[in-house]
Amino acid sequence: MKLPSTSDGTRQAYVMGSALIAMGVLHFAAPKGFDSIIPAEIGVPARTLTYVSGAAELAIGTGLLAPRTRKVAALAAIALFVAVFPANINTVRVFRDKPIGYRLGAIARLPLQVPMITSAWQVFARSR
């Protein structure tokens, strides 16, 4: 299957939407790993936040696939990427005693939020 052109952000939207849907499914299929990185300081049960963020990823990912909802979904993706950043920071803390590969992966993940947010903004800006 050939993806559409990138001039209107459709290809980016498809890739981001598909990735968010896959991650959303993982939140429900294997929640334990996601539970473990949610900061306890938030004060909400980790499983609840795992399911809420998984549902958000499913909804936003689906929204990115549909041209009529793409613009709003792109803004929601930006909000989601900002909202989950504390869990990404907490992953570094949680993985402190893990093997070096896990720790490096957790650290490397932090700056990836910037291109994810930038990409979502590009989808927003290019969408009609």
Image (spheres, rainbow, N blue to C red):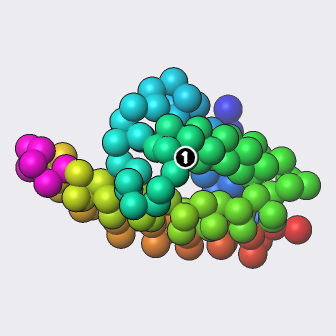
x, y percent for residue 98: 12, 44
Q: Is residue 98 above or below residue 115?
A: above
Q: Quadrant of residue 72?
A: bottom right
The residue shown at (39%, 31%) is: 32
Q: Is residue 27 above or below residue 20?
A: above
Q: Is residue 3 visible?
A: no
Residue kind at label 1, given as amino acid type = Leu
The residue shown at (45%, 27%) is: 30
Q: Is residue 111 above or below residue 98?
A: below
Which image quarter holds the C terminus? bottom right
Residue under label 1: 49
Image position of 103 (left or right of 121): left
Q: Which residues are magenta?
A: 95-100
The residue shown at (86%, 55%) is: 69
Looking at the image, how many numbered discs can be counted on the residues?
A: 1
Q: Nearer the viewer, residue 111 or 42?
A: 42
x, y percent for residue 39: 38, 56
Image position of 38 (left or right of 125): left
Which is the main secondary structure of the residues drawn in magenta? Answer: helix
Image position of 121 (left or right of 100): right
Q: Nearer the viewer, residue 82 or 94?
A: 94
Considering the numbered disc 1 on the image, is that residue within a helix, a strand or a loop?
helix
Image position of 124 (left or right of 93): right
x, y percent for residue 50: 52, 42
Q: Is residue 12 visible?
A: yes
Magenta residue check for 68 = no
The residue shown at (67%, 32%) is: 1
Q: Residues within 10 Å of mark 1 (few under 14, many from 20)?
A: some
Q: Quadrant of residue 20?
A: top right
Q: Is residue 27 above or below residue 39?
A: above
**Extreme-front residue of the structure:** 43
